[in-house]
């Protein structure tokens, strides 16, 4: 796992010095369109302006590193990678602008005689005047004593690079800071401007079109949430539990040797098996993050290529090794469909949401952050299994898994934005089941019944309020609450089934609602943050509501003034 630092909250005593100015000179300047990956990030930053648009990296510094070694290394990397000297304009049209030359300002702090942790620098960097990730591709802070650098952290804009691009920077920085003779820009390499133009030419353009075709198919059939649970009434907070298990890493090595599949695919298979048992569904459509780094020129590419890609893993295989193979095949397929125009995908999603009466969550279920086996020295592994809890940023995702490491120890984080629906004991239960499954699969290929036995999980409890409609598990009570809120003061009642048709809503016509289309529009507007609700499949508008709105026969006896699905053909989104 790379040294991505976290901030400390205790009192800091580092003394700020005059900043260091590092001039840089590249070979090329230019303007051009954004890459599809950059467009994806720009849309995210615009939609969630409070999101943290930076990734933090702890600089790998050998003991006794001179300040000149660090500044020279930054100058070389800024010249080598155009993304480090690019800014981004929202447009229209959105654009990236590469500067041929300029200056990097590095924040410098004197450590005095005390020891320094990189996390302290991160905290100090956070308190500096904020810079937009659109206009500042990177920012750096160093702790020094005399002419020596004791610690350093860097924030890199998500528009500049994804996590694997950040790892490229970290790997090259660690090498150059140790080897002055290698501080050369080197041969020309693939740059974000090159990627942007390549995406507009065949065959990459055909590949992006194919990805959108797959997206359209998935959006028309997939559940809006793979995992749904009833609210407990607790506050809707975001929290994560990180499992650290050396024993599970040892088990992964044995399974890898037996199956020939990589460790991330094995972990994904275990996740899918456990979720299949908990949701009661043998196959699931969900999102993963595709690195989109499958050719030689992307190996040392410093840019953002990663995008969400749809994935379908069928866990109906007769054994765990079969599930591992299915996970590997699904990962390969997702990689072929991981580059696309997010604006076009969003329009497809809006049309599917309107047609199906749902709101999708586009957070990935699985994010593989394992960079490689030689990028950095392994962190000291705990003696046994540990579980650490961390508050997280607000999100609408029910479950998300982040795989950080799988060599010396398995580091798997599971987090939710719905602690009211996925409480802490459920997160712990799922992670424990995954660990138990891996430990048992280390010595043998587990049969389906054996997998059920070792995880010890039963399907989520669902009472009579639950209904499976259009592959989505929903609660009729939540649909009723939706109607009560968005149609008030009109009387409305949803029934689980009417004459063989699911989720039929009866309502009294009023000034705001004179047609099924108007009712559906209001319901769609109020559907956000309701993971166990969807809009009615049909709306029946009556002249007046009966005295007992819960009486279906009474509604059926009322004169109907309008009815229909409320879905507009060709809805633009």
Image: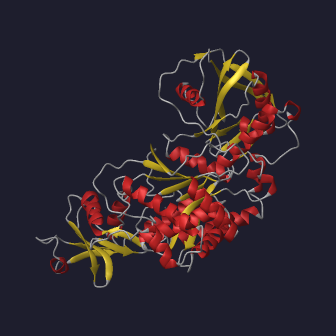
Name the residue rendered at 24%, 60% in the picture.
484
Is residue 139 shown above or below 298?
above
**At which x and y percent is residue 568?**
43, 70
Is residue 402 shown above or below 74?
below
Is residue 24 shown above or below 499?
above
Comparing 174 with 29, the one in front is 174
Left/right placement of residue 11 relative to residue 538 reads right
Comparing 489 with 115, the one in front is 115
Residue 572 seen in render: no
**At which x and y percent is residue 160?**
67, 42
Left/right placement of residue 367 relative to residue 161 reads left
**At which x and y percent is residue 45?**
54, 44
Name the residue rendered at 88%, 40% in the picture.
186
Give the image quarter of residue 325: bottom right
Left/right placement of residue 371 relative to residue 269 reads right
In the orientation shown, which residue stands out farthest toward the left?
547
**At which x and y percent is residue 180?**
85, 30
Comparing 164 with 524, the one in front is 164
């Amino acid at each position: 796992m790379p040294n991505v630092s976290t901030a400390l909250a205790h009192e800091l005593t580092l003394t700020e010095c005059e900043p260091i100015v590092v001039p840089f000179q590249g070979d090329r300047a230019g303007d051009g369109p954004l890459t599809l990956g950059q467009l994806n990030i720009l849309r995210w930053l615009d939609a969630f302006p409070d999101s943290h648009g930076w990734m933090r990296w702890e600089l790998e510094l050998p003991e006794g590193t001179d300040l000149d070694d660090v500044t020279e290394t930054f100058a070389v990397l800024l010249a080598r990678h155009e993304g480090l000297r690019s800014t981004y304009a929202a447009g229209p049209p959105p654009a990236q602008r590469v500067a041929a030359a300029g200056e990097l300002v590095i924040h410098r702090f004197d450590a005095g005689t005390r020891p320094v942790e990189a996390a302290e620098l991160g905290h100090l960097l956070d308190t500096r005047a904020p810079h937009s990730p659109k206009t500042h591709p990177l920012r750096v802070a160093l702790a020094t004593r005399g002419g020596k650098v004791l610690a350093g952290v860097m924030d890199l804009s998500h528009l500049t690079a994804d996590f694997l691009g950040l790892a490229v920077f970290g790997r090259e920085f660690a090498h150059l800071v140790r080897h002055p003779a290698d501080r050369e820009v080197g041969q020309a390499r693939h740059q974000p401007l090159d990627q942007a133009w390549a995406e507009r030419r065949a065959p990459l353009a055909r590949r992006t079109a194919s990805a959108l075709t797959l997206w359209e198919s998935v959006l028309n059939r997939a559940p809006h949430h793979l995992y749904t649970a009833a609210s407990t009434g607790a506050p809707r907070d975001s929290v994560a539990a990180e499992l650290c298990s050396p024993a599970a890493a040892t088990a992964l090595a044995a399974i890898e040797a037996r199956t020939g599949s990589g460790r991330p695919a094995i972990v994904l298979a275990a996740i899918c098996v456990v979720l299949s048992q908990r949701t009661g569904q043998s196959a699931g459509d969900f999102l993963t993050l595709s690195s989109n780094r499958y050719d030689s020129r992307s190996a040392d590419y410093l840019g953002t290529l990663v995008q969400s890609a749809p994935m379908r893993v069928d866990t109906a295989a007769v054994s765990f090794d079969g599930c591992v193979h299915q996970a590997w095949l699904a990962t390969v397929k997702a990689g072929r469909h991981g580059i696309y125009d997010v604006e076009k995908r969003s329009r497809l999603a809006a049309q599917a949401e309107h047609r199906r009466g749902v709101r999708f969550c586009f957070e990935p279920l699985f994010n593989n952050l394992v960079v490689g086996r030689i990028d950095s020295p392994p962190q000291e592994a705990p003696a046994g299994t540990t579980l650490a809890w961390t508050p997280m940023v607000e999100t609408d995702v029910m479950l998300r898994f982040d795989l950080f490491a799988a060599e010396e120890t398995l580091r798997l984080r599971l987090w939710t934005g719905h602690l009211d629906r996925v409480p802490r004991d459920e997160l712990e239960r799922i992670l424990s089941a995954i660990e138990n499954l891996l430990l048992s699969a280390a010595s043998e290929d587990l049969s389906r019944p054996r997998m059920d036995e070792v995880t010890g999980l039963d399907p989520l409890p669902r009472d009579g309020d639950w209904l499976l409609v259009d592959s989505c598990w929903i609660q009729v009570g939540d649909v009723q609450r939706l109607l009560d809120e968005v149609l008030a003061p009109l009387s409305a009642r949803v029934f689980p089934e009417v004459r063989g048709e699911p989720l039929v809503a009866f309502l009294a016509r009023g000034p705001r609602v004179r047609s099924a289309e108007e009712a559906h529009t209001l319901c769609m507007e109020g559907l956000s943050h309701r993971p166990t609700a969807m809009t009615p499949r049909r709306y029946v508008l009556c002249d007046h509501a009966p005295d007992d709105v819960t009486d279906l026969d009474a509604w059926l006896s009322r004169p109907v003034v309008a009815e229909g699905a409320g879905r507009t053909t060709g809805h633009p989104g």
